[in-house]
Structures are given as C-alpha cells and as structure tokens.
Amino acid sequence: MSNDQKKVWITGASSGIGKAVAEKFAKENWKVAISARRENLLNEMAKNENIFAYPTDVTDSNKTQETFNKILKDFQDIDLCIFSSGTYERKSEKGLSVENVKTVMEVNFLGVVGCVKAVQEYFQNKKNGHISIVSSPVGYRGLPKSSGYTASKASLNNFTQGIYFDFKKFNVRVSLISPGFIKTALTDKNEFKMPFLKDTNYAAEKIYNGLINKKSFEIIFPPQIAFIYKIFQILPNKVYNFLVNKFVNR
Ligand SMILES: NC(=O)c1ccc[n+]([C@@H]2O[C@H](COP(=O)([O-])OP(=O)(O)OC[C@H]3O[C@@H](n4cnc5c(N)ncnc54)[C@H](OP(=O)(O)O)[C@@H]3O)[C@@H](O)[C@H]2O)c1
C-alpha cells in the first residue's frame, strides 16, 4: 500500500449500495473505511486488503464522532466521505406510525447530520475534501404510502443543499447522490414492480464516476429516473397531484 493512496469513509457499507461502492473504491485502489452496525458483514468485507471495518450506529452521534476519530487516527487523512446509511419499512410507511417516522428520521436524517457533524471540523480545517450524501429523488415531492421515508429524504435533500454553501466557503465539496430503484434488501420489501430497476454494481459505477470524474452537485441515475423526477419537480401542484393520484395512488 502506498502513502499517496486516497482515503474514503463510507457508512451504510455492510450491504446494498454502500457495500458495492466500498468494493468499487477498493478496486480503484482507495483505502476504504467502512461503517454500519453489522460487524460480521464488515469483517467479511475487510478481508479485502484495501477495506477496514469501523462498526458504528449512526443514531448515536457520540459513537459516530468516536468512530471518525478512530478512522482519522489510523488513516491520518480522509479525502472523501460517503454517507449511505438508511432504513425503510414498507409496511409501516403505509399507515401513519409516529414510531416509524421517528425511527426513519433518526437513521436517515439525524444519523447523516451526526456524520456530517463528526467530520465538519476536520474538513473545515483541512480546507479541502468532499462529503457526499446518499438521499433519493423520492424526497423531491410528497408521495402516497410513504409517511416517513420520503419526508426523511426531503429533509436530507434540503440539508445537503444547505451545507453545500457552508462547506464551499472552506473549499470542501458537498454532493448529493439520488439513486433510482436499485435492487437491495431495502427495495426487496417493495411489492410493486419497480421501474428501471438496476443492480448495485450499476449504482457503484455511476456513483464512482459522478464523484471522481464529474463536478456536479447531484449524481442522479439511471437517466430515465432523472428525466421523470426532474419533470415531477417542476410540475404545478395541480398537474403533479393529478398524475400521482391517477398512476401511483392505487
Ligand atoms: N435501493 C434503492 O433503490 C435506493 C434508492 C434511493 C436511495 N437509496 C438509499 O441508499 C442508501 C442505502 O440503501 P440500500 O438500498 O443500499 O439498502 P441496504 O442494503 O438496506 O443498506 C442500508 C445500509 O444502512 C446501514 N444502516 C441502517 N441503519 C443504520 C444505523 N442505525 N447505523 C449505521 N448504519 C445503518 C445498514 O447496515 P446495518 O444494518 O449493518 O447497520 C446498511 O449497510 C439508503 O440511504 C437508501 O435510502 C436506496
């Protein structure tokens, strides 16, 4: 391993998109710190010589800070953070469960806020680096049967755009990752046919390319989903509500 190796911290890396992204970065010879709660899965991944396991629960902001401090001590430097932890319970989303909304907000929104807080001082002092947040285009506007998840992603989209400006002053890039439907344990809970469903390797390629070879704020894929959601974003309420009611609200 050479000393000029680039270094990345990825949360939500024990499965799905985060795992595929971690493996892609490792393949590209980055030194990769991975975090999530399931230690056994992280240790399995850490058999790769470029991957190192740092278990954490993002709902505990003190633990998140300790985890980042430990990574920094071991790695000496971090170039990029990708925060991909998230949760979704299709069944609980259909009703209006305060408990579900709390859990989803704690993981998907406050969990990511805790991660950004953990790295804030480091990046602002370093005056360089990149923080990227995995959210979702479903956060653009309200959708039926999604009482917590879309609200958590709407918060995350707004938060990410806000901190883009705050970190830009310190020469730190902030970007937003908006995947369409990707086949993972999270989407396996959906009983409906997911349009333009892609696998995690596709997502990892798109994310790597967007983070490393492009400079745009948002990395959104696949192109069909980008097109549909960008139209959704600008439609007047009357048209949007009519279309969602007719085609989604069944
Ligand atoms: N799949 C899609 O179609 C899709 C589309 C748009 C956005 N997304 C977003 O992409 C991200 C990854 O989702 P995925 O589809 O890859 O699902 P996944 O396979 O279920 O991955 C979720 C990851 O988050 C981690 N996680 C959950 N709660 C955590 C906690 N409290 N502390 C630390 N880590 C936690 C999980 O690990 P542990 O259980 O080991 O903690 C796992 O590694 C999520 O933010 C999701 O909202 C997914």
Image (cartoon, rainbow, N blue to C red):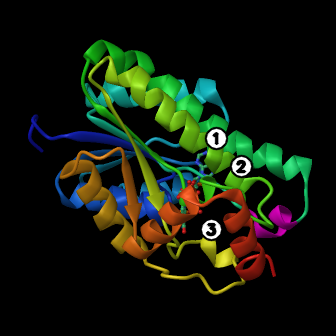
Q: Are marks 2 and 1 in contact (CB under 8 Å)?
A: yes
Q: What residue is shown at x 77% (from left), y 62% (from top)?
A: 146
The percent position of residue 71, horizontal first and vertical second, equals 38, 31
Please give the count of numbered marks on the rendered protein: 3
What mark, if any, has residue 186 been given in the picture?
3
Q: Position of residue 64 (x, y in %)?
A: 55, 31
- Kindly identify which residue carries mark 2: 151
Q: Please tell me how crowded label 1 is: few (under 14), some (14-19), or many (20+) other residues with Cα within 10 Å.
A: some
Horizontal and vertical percent for residue 136?
54, 57
Mark 2 vs 3, N-terminal side: 2
Q: Secondary structure at mark 1?
A: helix
- Considering depth in this image, is 136 or 29 the residue closer to the camera? 136
Q: Is residue 147 left or right of residue 63?
A: right
Q: Which residue is mark 1?
A: 155
Mark closer to the chain start, 3 or 1: 1
Which range is magenta? 89-94
How far, Cα to Cα, is label 2 from label 1?
6 Å
Q: Residue at x 81, y 82 (%)?
A: 250
What's the amino acid at mark 2?
A: Ala
| Nearer to us in this view, 126 or 225 | 225
Cα–Cα span, label 3 and label 1: 19 Å
Q: CA distance from mark 2 to mark 3?
A: 17 Å
Q: Quadrant of ligand 1?
A: bottom right
